Image (spheres, helix red, strand yellow):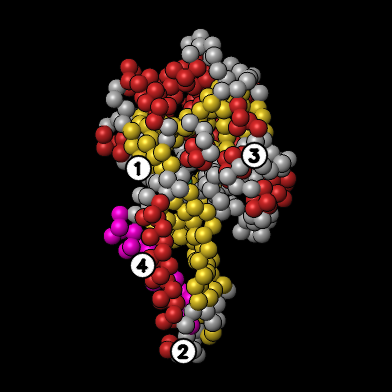
Amino acid sequence: MPDDFEAMWSELAPLGRSAASGGYFRQPFTSVESELRSWFREQCAARELPVEADGNGNLLAWWGAGSDAVLVGSHLDSVLDGGAYDGPLGVVSSLAAIDLLRSRGVAPRRPVAVGAFAEEEGSRFGLACLGSRLASGTTTPESARELRDRDGVPLLDAMAAAGVEPSLGRADWLDRIGCFLELHVEQGRDLVDRERVVGLATEIWPHGRYRFDFTGDANHAGTTRMEDRHDPMLSFAMTALAAGKQARVSGQRATFGRVDVAPNGTNAIPSRVTAWLDARGETDESLVRLVAEIKRQGTERSGRDGTRLEVTSESVSGAVSFDPVLTAGVRSRLADRWGDVPVIPTMAGHDAGILAAAGVPTAMMFVRNPTGVSHSPEEFAEMADCLAGVEALADAIEGLVS
Ligand code: GLV
Ligand code: MN
Ligand code: MN
């Protein structure tokens, strides 16, 4: 008898949890992530769902074989000090939905696959949705081979050390997928405000990651007169303020959440500050304008500080509209039990966005999050809402496979 949702959830709860913050550190190809993969394989084995590993770190469990499959699932990795739900909720709900469909006696006329995608957050190798990017050919194996983590460990070495046999590149499972429905915890307050438990997605905002390298001149913190300094920290600080203001006035998003300072000593002016900008815009054009303006203001300030700024675009994902036919079909299937399900945009990136851009008809389903907080230990969903999400997902899958 496979574990039910609550049992699966409590098995996952301690894995990668920080005692200090209560948040999760589930970085890809680490020992904790290996435990998560083993857990996924065990759960699939208990359900007699054969698991396929694609050489990009992704795992797919199959209920039935063949083509035109309905893909569900999400990811098991987290951001640094993340919540329990972003990712695992979609994977665990998918396994529980299969149990529910079996208990309803559903005999699917199309295969159902449950995906657990690798490095969705980009928290270790910097590139979000790495597994789905590689599997869909959106990122080449050559560029992925260049990726290193913060300690300089190459991606392939990390995979091999975790016992994942790397064979990077477009996965042949992609040709067996007819559509993808990713269930995810909501990362805002839309559903809470509407007093609704589940929702669907219209689109993902364009977003990107940009590395800002500010270089200056290291010197003594005491003996260097203020007017003689070339301090890249000041150039960065002003750029961060400008980014926040620019995003606020234009209704977009800009975040510097990661900074690396060299040499990072208290009594020396730094020689270099590297900071990563995460920017998101309502349209592709507004994102380009936002980043250009932040770069312009950073460059101008660097000129005044006698420092230098170089901006490298590390990854940019264009606007994604989810499949309107698939979304409408799921929405009408849900109408009986769930009423008029809200359809809302999201500013977060997802594997669903990568597969949609690669041509897979894709939809997303959200489960209410009473805190509205995500990428933080505060992320939450009530157990009753998680169970409702399982039921809604099962209803949606049933509509697609009957
Ligand atoms: C992924 O969760 C992202 O939007 O960064
Ligand atoms: Mn996330
Ligand atoms: Mn996610």
Q: What segment carries the magenta color?
A: 230-251
Q: Amino acid at mark 4?
A: Ala
Q: Is residue 235 magenta?
A: yes
Instruction: Write down the residue under mark 2.
Output: 228
Do callouts 3 and 1 mark residues in contact (Cβ within 8 Å)?
no
The circle on residue 170 is: 3
Dot 2 or dot 1: first in sequence order is 1
Please, what secondary structure does the residue beneath circle 4 have? Answer: helix
The circle on residue 9 is: none
Image quadrant in which the N terminus is located: top right
> Residue 118 location, x and y as percent?
59, 41
Q: Is residue 58 magenta?
A: no
- Alpha-carbon span between mark 1 and mark 4: 25 Å
Check disc 2: other Cα within 10 Å, few if <14, some if 14-19, many if 20+.
Answer: few
Q: Amino acid at mark 1?
A: Gly
Report the mark closest to the observer, 1 or 4. 4
Check disc 1: other Cα within 10 Å, few if <14, some if 14-19, many if 20+.
Answer: some
Instruction: Write down the residue under mark 1.
Output: 188
Please, what secondary structure does the residue beneath circle 2 have? Answer: helix
The circle on residue 242 is: 4
Check disc 4: other Cα within 10 Å, few if <14, some if 14-19, many if 20+.
Answer: some
Report the mark closest to the observer, 2 or 4. 4
- Alpha-carbon span between mark 2 and mark 1: 46 Å
Do callouts 2 and 1 mark residues in contact (Cβ within 8 Å)?
no
- Name above or below for residue 386 compared with residue 369: above
Dot 3 or dot 1: first in sequence order is 3
